[in-house]
């Protein structure tokens, strides 16, 4: 089967030769610089067979290589096996960057081909400067895929729906006013928005164009004289047209952006967020561009009181669903029945769907038993699926999209037998989780300043993990959003009240097991002193950690108290929504942890 990927890459090479292209770079992206993309834009997956959400394919006239990060090392090695595509483990000291590899292996004067509609303007500008210094050129109009991919999926035509103000907490008109006020402050008159989650947030619309991400394929132009949403007409209804018209937002065909932008008045200044806009868009705007940061990114990340309260309610429904799920898993195993990774993922969606206001999963579930738990972004398939058993631990990372909030939770549980090493590893991860979750920090703190808190205990044992400790989370939107995060990489965005962020340290022993413990936390004010404002985290997620995996001999009294206080909160908030049997199960899972 994998010979198909060799054939597709050879067809690409033939096109490259015909067009004078020495190297083609194919990212995992779309014209909106999205992390998760619709099937129409899954070009890298179509060429390589690798299904991870992050990774870039580089094709030369005699080699093909794929760069991806640590989340996908194991998965990529398996999926690329037999394709002749070389795995490049991005982030390791010995792995050159894509640019460096191309510079070292491409003759001077050669041309590198990229599709300018799927590369951000900032990244393309940086690449052009880097390659020009080594006498290499970039052709950002190289896009042979329409000729090569004959059965390519069409652009999605899912209807858009209105995200009602009773859930969003703010009207479209109010949001547009705030955005344009910031645009004016940056020296522009209007702004052009490409990011799908930003468009969905501003216009209070949602859709199903991207699996698990409730966004609609579109572009948006905002201006004081009136705004325009560029979207496929088939996606609109009379209700959604009226919803947009009420806020002076007209609609136009998705493909008409070039004509629209090129025909704007020559004197109009248009704010463009370069890192989040395709490089092919810039020539359309031309000299009208004012480079700046989209104000929507920060506005969207700071949840209002209605969104926060909605998220708290969504967490209760999510916790109830997980009680049902884990009881089901235990009952099946105790009764001698089998249950597989795929079945657990399906059941997680089933029990969430029983709750009110459920819309979809917030990402494909990561249900990994034993060694599969060490694959950070593992996705169980028909070929890889295994049954759960008492012989090892089970990791489940899953979440839901609800009209009033987005959830994301990881729990690692013992299914029976556990080793001393597993308990120690789990407890070290939890000590880091508690350190982050209980931290008080001054205003102006960045995520990178907190990240080592989560890793310190693992580091002392010679352990670590390569992924970030936390990412921002949307409100009935993308489960990954910025600007904030908690990771070792420096990020200038600070943590401010209203932001929801994950707290998910882990450790992964390849071929044995993986451990990750994740809650979502809300930044809230703590207190003020003569040294300024201080913030803390409110834990939002409601589900117990496995008491059977703690090694209390390496825990402080304060850490044990944190677990007991958290479990008391979980029990008190979930029990009113459980039947007698479920409440008894939860009471046992949240019993006091003692030495």
Image (cartoon, helix red, strand yellow):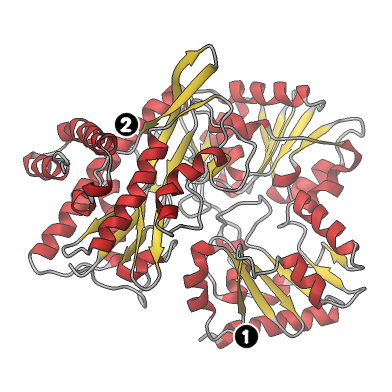
Front-most of 427 and 68? 427
Where residue 459 appears, as percent x and y from the top left, is 45, 54
Contact (Cβ within 8 Å) of mark 1 with mark 2: no
Q: Which residue is mark 2?
A: 313
Residue 166 seen anywhere in this rendered image of the structure: no
Residue 319 seen anywhere in this rendered image of the structure: yes
Quarter of the image with the C terminus in it? top left
Image point (45%, 57%), residue name: 464
Where residue 62 appears, as percent x and y from the top left, is 74, 85
Label 2 SS: helix
Mark drawn on residue 338? none
Front-most of 454 and 184? 454
Image point (56%, 58%), residue name: 38
Question: Quick one: which residue is furthest to the top in this view?
Answer: 530
Q: Residues within 10 Å of mark 1 (few under 14, many from 20)?
A: some
Where residue 356 appears, as percent x and y from the top left, is 29, 38
In the displayed structure, would residue 341 be above or below residue 277? below
In the displayed structure, would residue 120 be above or below residue 229? below
Front-most of 518 and 274? 518
Front-most of 164 and 89? 89
The tag earlier along the polypeptide, 1 or 2, is 1
Does residue 272 appear left or right of residue 349 in this picture? right
Image point (28%, 62%), residue name: 421
Q: Which residue is mark 1?
A: 6
């Amino acid at each position: 089967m994998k010979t198909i990927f060799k054939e597709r890459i050879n067809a690409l090479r033939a096109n490259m030769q015909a067009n004078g292209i020495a190297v083609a770079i194919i990212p995992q992206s779309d014209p909106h610089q999205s992390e998760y993309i619709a099937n129409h834009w899954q070009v890298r997956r179509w060429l390589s067979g690798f299904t991870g959400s992050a990774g870039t394919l580089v094709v030369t006239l005699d080699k093909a290589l794929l760069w991806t990060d640590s989340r996908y090392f194991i998965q990529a090695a398996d999926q690329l096996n037999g394709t002749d595509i070389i795995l490049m483990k991005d982030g390791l000291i010995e792995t050159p960057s894509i640019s460096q590899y191309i510079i070292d292996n491409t003759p001077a004067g050669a041309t590198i081909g990229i599709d300018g509609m799927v590369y951000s303007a900032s990244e393309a500008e940086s690449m052009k400067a880097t390659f020009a210094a080594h006498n290499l050129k970039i052709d950002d109009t190289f896009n042979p895929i329409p000729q090569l991919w004959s059965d390519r999926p069409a652009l999605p035509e899912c209807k858009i729906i209105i995200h009602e103000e009773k859930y969003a907490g703010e009207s479209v008109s109010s949001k547009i006013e705030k955005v344009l006020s910031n645009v004016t402050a940056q020296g522009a008159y209007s702004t052009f928005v490409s990011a799908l989650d930003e468009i969905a947030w501003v216009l209070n619309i949602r859709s199903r164009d991207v699996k698990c991400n409730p966004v609609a394929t579109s572009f948006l132009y905002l201006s004081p004289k009136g705004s325009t949403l560029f979207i496929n007409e088939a996606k609109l209804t009379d209700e959604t047209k009226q919803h947009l018209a009420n806020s002076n937002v007209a609609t136009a065909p998705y493909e008409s952006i070039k004509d629209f932008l090129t025909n704007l008045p020559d004197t109009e200044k248009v704010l463009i967020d370069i890192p989040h806009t395709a490089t092919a868009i810039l020539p359309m705007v031309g000299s009208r561009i004012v480079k700046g940061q989209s104000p929507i990114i920060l506005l969207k990340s700071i949840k209002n009181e209605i969104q926060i309260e909605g998220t708290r309610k969504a967490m209760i429904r999510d916790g109830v669903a997980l009680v049902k799920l884990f009881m089901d898993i235990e009952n099946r195993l105790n009764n001698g029945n089998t249950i597989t990774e795929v079945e657990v993922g399906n059941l997680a969606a089933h029990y969430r769907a029983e709750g009110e206001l459920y819309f979809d999963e917030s990402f494909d579930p990561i249900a990994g038993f034993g060694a599969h738990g060490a694959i950070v972004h593992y996705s169980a398939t028909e070929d890889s699926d295994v049954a759960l058993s008492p012989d090892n631990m089970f990791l489940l990372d899953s979440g839901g999209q609800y009209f009033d909030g987005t959830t994301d939770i990881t729990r690692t549980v013992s299914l029976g037998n556990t080793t001393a090493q597993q308990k120690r590893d789990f407890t070290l991860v939890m000590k880091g989780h508690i350190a982050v979750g209980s931290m008080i920090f001054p205003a102006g703190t960045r995520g990178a300043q907190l990240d080592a808190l989560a890793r310190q205990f693992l580091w002392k044992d010679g352990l670590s993990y390569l992924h970030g400790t936390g990412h921002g989370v949307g409100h009935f939107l993308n489960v990954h959003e910025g600007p904030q995060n908690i990771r070792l990489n420096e990020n200038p965005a600070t943590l401010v009240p209203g932001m929801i962020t994950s707290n998910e340290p882990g450790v992964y022993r390849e071929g044995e097991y993986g451990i990750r413990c994740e809650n979502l936390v809300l930044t809230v004010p703590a207190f003020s002193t003569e040294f300024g404002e201080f913030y803390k985290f409110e834990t939002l997620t409601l589900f117990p950690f496995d008491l059977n995996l703690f090694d209390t001999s390496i825990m402080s009294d304060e850490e044990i108290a944190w677990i007991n206080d958290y479990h008391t909160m979980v029990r008190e908030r979930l029990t009113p929504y459980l039947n007698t049997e479920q409440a008894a199960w939860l009471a046992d899972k949240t019993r006091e942890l003692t030495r």
